[in-house]
Amino acid sequence: MKAFEVIGSFMISHRKWQPFAIEVASTDESGAREKTFALMGSRHGVKRRSVRIDGVKSLKAEEISDHVVKHLIEAKK
């Protein structure tokens, strides 16, 4: 597993977008995008079409700030 930072925005009202940056653990970039859609839907109740992903970048072990992601990365070694 690798750690990824996903940057984008999601719609909170008819014309207002809320930016976000989230760290996720996944095997590849497309998996990180899918995990982000799932997390944003469960946390904020938004549909996939209301989430825009602007970029996905891979993180090194020392760049990870989310403790859950860090634990998942270290456990899968």
Image: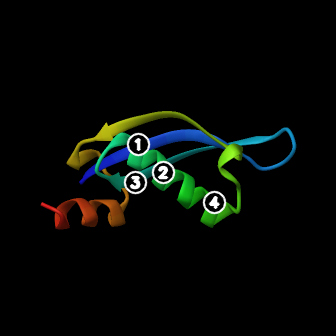
Going from N to C along the chain, the mark reached first, 3 or 4, is 3
Q: CA distance from mark 2 to mark 3?
A: 10 Å
Disc nearer the start of the sequence (3/1): 3
- The type of residue carrying mark 1 is Ser
Q: Which mark is residue 41?
A: 4
Give the residue number, with chain letter if any, for mark 1. Answer: 30
Q: Is residue 29 above or below residue 12?
A: above
Which amino acid, mark 3?
Val
* Callout 1–callout 2 Cβ contact below 8 Å: yes
Left-right relation of 71 to 65 = left
Classed neighbour count for the residue bearing mark 4: other residues with Cα under 10 Å, few (<14), some (14–19), many (≥20): some
Q: In the figure, residue 59 lies in which quadrant?
A: top left
Q: Residues within 10 Å of mark 3 (few under 14, many from 20)?
A: many
Residue 46 locus on image (x, y percent): 71, 56
| SS at badge 2 | helix
Measured Cα–Cα span from mark 2 to mark 4:
11 Å
Precedes in sequence: disc 2 or disc 4:
2
Query: How far from the left and from the top, in percent, is residue 76?
Result: 18, 63
